[in-house]
Amino acid sequence: VLYNAAHVIFIIQSRNSLSDMLDCTMLEIPHMNLFVKVFTLNWHMQRVDKINRLLKDPIFAPITKKDEEMLQETTRVMHLWIKLSKICITLITP
């Protein structure tokens, strides 16, 4: 079975909306909140790295314009999430 970039994104990533990704930052327990944010931030950064590595392989290159747009949007959302997580962690770290 051949996968294009669109398939790779959905295989690697379980969520595709910024609001879903930000739900994990809404925990009310402050100490747990920091741990969860750091863990989740690291996890998402690893996913971005994995996607970037896979996309260097010509097999996973975007086939259609829609695939390419979806990749760009997904990457943009993940980078925004990472940036917001870093800000949140900075603000709650004593």
Image: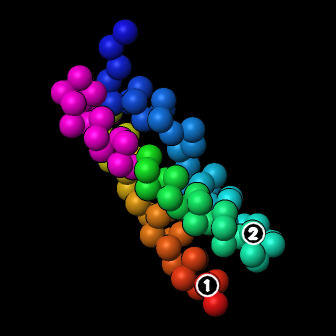
Figure coloring: rainbow
Per the rendering, the mark at residue 93 is: 1
Q: Residue furthest bottom?
A: 94
Q: Quadrant of residue 24?
A: bottom right
Residue 34 lies within the magenta run: no
The x, y position of residue 79, in whole percent, is: 41, 60
The residue type indicated by label 1 comes to Thr
What stretch of residues is rendered in magenta? 48-66
Q: Name the N-terminal-most of marks 1 and 2.
A: 2
On the question of residue 12 being in view, the answer is: yes
Q: Residue furthest right?
A: 29
**Residue at (53, 61) in percent of width and height:** 41
**Residue at (39, 49) in percent of width and height:** 48
Residue 52 lies within the magenta run: yes
Residue that carries the numbered disc 2 in the rendered image: 32
The x, y position of residue 91, in whole percent, is: 59, 85
In the image, taking residue 70 as reference, residue 31 lies left or right, namely right
- Dominant secondary structure of the magenta stretch? helix
SS for dot 2: helix
Within-10-Å neighbours for mark 2: few <14, some 14–19, many 20+: few
Of residue 89 and residue 78, the one placed in the foreground of this image is: 89
In the image, taking residue 87 as reference, residue 79 lies left or right, namely left
**Residue at (44, 46) in percent of width and height:** 47
The x, y position of residue 42, in whole percent, is: 50, 58
Q: CA distance from mark 1 to mark 2?
A: 12 Å
The residue type indicated by label 2 comes to Met
